[in-house]
Amino acid sequence: MATTRKQKLQRNLKLSFWIQALNELKVISVISTLFLVHRGLSLSQVLFTAIIFSATCLLTEIPSSYLADKWGRKKIIILSLVCSLGHWIIFLFASNIFLFIIAFIFCGFSFSLMSGTDEAFVYDTTRELGEERNSLKALGRYFSGRRIFKIITPILAVLIAKDLAENQFIFILMIDIAGTFLAIILSLLIVEPDRFLSVEKIEAGVMKDAFKIIRSNPSITKAIFNRTLIFIASFIIWRISSEFFVNIGVSVILVGVSVSFYQLAIFLSFRHIDKFLPRIAIERRINWLNYLFIISLASTIACLFLFPNKYLILILYTLGVIFETTRGALFSEYYNKQSCSYNRATTLSLANFMKSILDIPLLLLGAYLVTFSVNYIFVLSFVVSLIVIIFFGLSGKKTTRPTSS
C-alpha cells in the first residue's frame, strides 16, 4: 500500500469523526418537542412526525443501501448530508403539520442514506489499513463523534431558548444549518476505501446475499429485534421527554444539564467501548445493558405511579438513555463480524429497514395512548422492553479471550 494512500485512509477516520460530530450537532434536539409544540403541533402530532420519518426510512432503506454498495460510501454520505441540510432549512419556515411532514421526509431519506453506509465506511477503512481486529475500537471512536458536541449543546440550547421564544428557536436552527454545511465540506475530503469485490458481483448479488445472511442466521434476526425494539422503547419516551419534564415542573435549564450529562457519559462509553467487559462475548455485554435499561425503566414507572418525584424520575430516565445508547457500538461490531465486507452497508441498513417496519405500529400506539396520559408512554416502553428480555435475549459464550497482538 502506497504511503500516500495509507495516510489518506488514516485521515478518513479523523474526518469521519468530525463529519459525524457536525452532522449530529442538532442543538435543537433537546428542545425539539418544545419547538414543535411552539409551532402549533400537539404531542400526538409530534409522534406522528416520527411515523413519517420511519415510513420514509422504510421506503428508502433498501434502495439507499444498494446505492451505497454500488456508487460507493463517499457519494452517499455527501448526498445524505445535503438532504439533512434541506430538512433544517424547511424547519426554519415550517408553521404547520404539512410542512413538518416534508421536513421529516427529507430527514428520513438522509438517515436511510447514512445508515449502514457510515459504519461500513469506517469498517472497510480499517480493513484496508490492515487493522480489522481493531474495528470495534474504531467504531466506538466513530460513534463517540455523535456525542462530542452534544456534551455542551443541550446546555447551550436551553440557555439560548430559556424563554422558548421564536427568535431564540431560529437562532438555534441557524447553528444546526451551519454545522451540517461544514460537515458537507469535510465529506468532500474523504477517500473511498476498497470493498474487496468487483462492481459486477456487487450489482448481481449484494441484495440477495444480504437477505440470505439474515434469513439463514437466526442469531442476526434475533439481534435485529433486540436492538430495534428496545431502541424504539427508548425513543418514544425521548420524543416527548422535554415537554413531559417541563410539564411536571423541571426547569428547561435542568433538562439541558441532564442531557449534557448523559451525552458525556455516552461519549466516554463509546470512546472506551473495547474495554467494557472485554473477556465477555458481545452478546452477553448487550444483555447486561438491556437488563440495566429495563430496571431503570421499571423504577421510573414506580416513581410515576407510587411516589412521584420529578428529580428522581429525571435521574432514572437519564440512566436509561445511557444504558440503551451504549449498546449501539456493540451491535455494529456484532453485525460487522457476521457479514461480508462488500455488502456490509446493505446488511446494516436491512437492520434499520426492520426498525422502520416496527416503528410504525408502536409509534401509532404511542400517539393514541398519549392522548389519555403521558405516563402510558412509559408503560408501553416497559412492555416492549420486557418482550425483548423474554423472547429476544442474545446467546453468547461466557468468556472470550482477546486476540493477541
Image (spheres, helix red, strand yellow):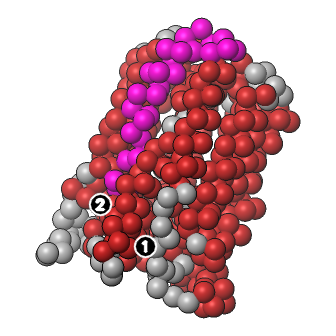
According to the picture, the residue beneath numbered tag 1 turns out to be 124
Does the magenta portion include 164?
yes
Judge the density around disc 2: few (<14), some (14-19), many (≥20) Cα neighbours within 10 Å: some
Q: Residue shown at 44%/21% (left/top)?
A: 155
First along the sequence among labels 1 and 2: 1
Q: Residue shown at 48%/67% (left/top)?
A: 191
Q: Amino acid at mark 1?
A: Asp
Q: Where residue 341 appears, x then y in whole percent?
A: 46, 79
According to the picture, the residue beneath numbered tag 2 turns out to be 137
Element under label 2?
helix
Element under label 1?
helix
| Most common SS among magenta residues | helix
Query: Which range is magenta?
Result: 139-168
Which quadrant of the view contains residue 229? Answer: bottom right
Q: Nearer the viewer, residue 293 or 265?
A: 265
Q: Amino acid at mark 2?
A: Lys
Does the magenta portion include 371?
no
Q: Nearer the viewer, residue 285 or 173?
A: 173
